[in-house]
């Protein structure tokens, strides 16, 4: 254990980061709106319009985050009688961590995976795939759910869900703008030099903003996976369950293409293991081997 | 100038006093809450035992000793007053229940009984939950002890007349694997 992050520190950091993230993304959106407005005519109409949309979108993202995440993977509430073990494990872990009980969901997917979402522990949800319920034994499932509960306890969920939603928005705006350029043709030539400059700035912003925001998101989300693994062990008092689960995930061969349709790229960082299974800079998760290695040392 | 410094220090002191008072209060609440969580699980277990005995009775006619052991352990648990006594009584009950479930392996008809299986599942889930609730109780006591023993918490603890809290200990009986004689 080289560097140990205290939980309170991490929670405070996550809350602070969430706030700054929203702030920065709103600024980016306003800047985009202004530049796009400059190109297409009245910048102030766009500015006011853009600001209002950005704020409303952020509020919806903040208060509806867990519902959006659950809806986007088409998950259904878990039935208490049908999935008794699932409920028992989470109830036990909540007792172990002193946390309120999250709402439990199940998504139809053969991959072993799970995610947590919400703006705070009181409004949190946990969702597991049907694959996880079928392939993991009780002990391993407990490890996975403990990992998800740690994300909730550390307020990772607020930050990660907000990033997912806001990054998604920047991407959408940029995409719409860039596409609109193809169709608008050379209609704005009469605006002269300043028009061209703003057009260039607009294109540059539209291309760079999503990449920049996403890189920040990726770097941060990889680090917190390790932290969540560590606190998962704190709840269950043994790493063996989580190690077993990660090993099973590592060795399962699922056609990634089929699951790609179901899981939007934006919410990938929420999952316990990367649903797209790529292990490089663009990955939202550290490599499974590395995580197993660290857990085995505990 | 001097007065403003004195005033500033006084305000700071009051803030620190209040913040430590609250920190102790929060941790005490957490310990109390986790104690009541243990209590809830113990009560659930005690409530389920009569149902279990009912479903078992017909099959295990010749296991009188173990059945009375469970019944007595449950009675002791219900009668126990404080948390420590309850936890001790519960450990006995848990041990007796383990023997029942081990013995149930000898009765294929009982093992096929839907009601029995459901109760067995329910009770084993409660066993996990009791363990987790106890773990959280001890975690809370640890946090309290950390504040209580380290500086400057130890000073404030004396000012507010706070007492050290007790951990829940695992008794030897629980640590030993239950023996079942056939």
Image (cartoon, rainbow, N blue to C red):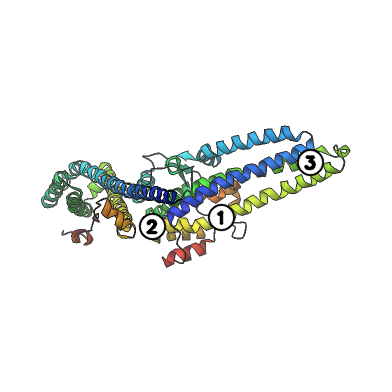
Tell me the residue at 72%/47% (across/down): A205
- Which is more toward the observer, B151 or A266? B151
At label 2, counting other C-alpha atoms closer than 10 Å, the crowd grade (few under 14, some 14-19, many 20 or more) is some
Q: Earlier in the sequence, mark 1 or mark 2?
A: 1
Q: Quadrant of the C terminus of chain A?
A: bottom left
> Circle 1 is placed at which residue position?
A220
Percent x, y for residue A144?
Answer: 44, 53
Q: Secondary structure at mark 2?
A: helix
Say whether residue A247 is left or right of residue B138: right
Percent x, y for residue A74?
Answer: 53, 40
Question: Does residue A4 appear in this view?
Answer: yes
Percent x, y for residue A24?
Answer: 62, 46
- Which is more toward the observer, A184 or A197? A197
Say whether residue A228 is left or right of residue A200: left
Q: Which mark is residue A294?
A: none
Q: Which mark is residue A181?
A: 3
């Amino acid at each position: 254990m080289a560097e140990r992050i205290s939980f309170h520190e991490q929670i405070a950091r996550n809350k602070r980061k969430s706030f700054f993230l929203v702030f920065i993304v709103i600024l980016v959106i306003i800047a985009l709106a202004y530049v796009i407005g400059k190109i297409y005519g009245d910048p102030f109409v766009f500015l006011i319009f853009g600001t209002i949309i950005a704020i409303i979108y952020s509020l919806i993202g903040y208060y509806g985050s867990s519902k959006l995440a659950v809806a986007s993977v088409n998950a259904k509430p878990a039935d208490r009688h049908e999935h008794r073990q699932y409920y028992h494990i989470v109830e036990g872990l909540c007792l172990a961590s002193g946390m309120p009980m999250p709402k439990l969901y199940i998504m139809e997917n053969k991959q072993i995976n799970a995610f947590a979402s919400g703006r705070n522990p009181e409004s949190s949800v946990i969702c597991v795939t049907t694959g996880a319920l079928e392939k993991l034994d009780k002990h391993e499932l407990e490890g996975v759910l403990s990992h998800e509960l740690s994300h909730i306890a550390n307020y990772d969920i607020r930050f990660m869900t907000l990033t997912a939603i806001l990054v998604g928005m920047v991407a959408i705006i940029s995409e719409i703008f860039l596409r609109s350029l193809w169709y608008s043709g050379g209609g704005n030539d009469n605006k002269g030099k300043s028009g061209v400059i703003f057009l260039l700035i607009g294109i540059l912003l539209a291309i760079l903003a999503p990449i920049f925001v996403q890189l920040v998101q990726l770097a941060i989300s990889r680090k917190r996976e390790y932290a969540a693994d560590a606190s998962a062990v704190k709840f269950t008092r043994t790493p063996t369950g989580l190690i077993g689960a990660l090993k099973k995930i590592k060795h399962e061969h699922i056609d990634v293409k089929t699951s790609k349709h179901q899981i939007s790229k934006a919410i990938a960082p929420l999952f316990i293991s990367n649903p797209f299974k790529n292990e490089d800079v663009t990955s939202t998760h550290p490599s499974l081997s590395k995580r197993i290695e660290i857990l085995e040392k505990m | 100038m001097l007065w403003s410094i004195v005033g500033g220090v006084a305000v700071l002191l009051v803030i620190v006093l209040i913040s430590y008072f609250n920190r102790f209060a929060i941790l005490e609440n957490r310990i109390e809450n986790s104690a009541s969580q243990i209590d809830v699980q113990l009560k659930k277990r005690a409530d389920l035992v009569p149902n279990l005995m009912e479903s078992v009775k017909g099959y295990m006619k010749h296991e009188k000793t173990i059945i009375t052991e469970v019944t007595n352990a449950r009675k002791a648990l219900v009668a126990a007053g404080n948390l420590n006594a309850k936890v001790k009584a519960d450990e006995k009950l848990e041990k007796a229940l383990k023997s029942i479930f081990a013995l149930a392996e000898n009765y294929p008809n009982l093992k096929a009984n839907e009601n029995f299986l459901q109760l067995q599942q329910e009770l084993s889930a409660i066993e996990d939950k009791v363990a987790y609730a106890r773990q959280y109780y001890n975690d809370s006591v640890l946090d309290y002890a950390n504040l209580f023993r380290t500086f400057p918490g130890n000073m404030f603890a004396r000012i507010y007349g706070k007492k050290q809290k007790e951990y829940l200990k695992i008794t030897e009986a629980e640590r030993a694997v239950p023996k079942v004689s056939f």
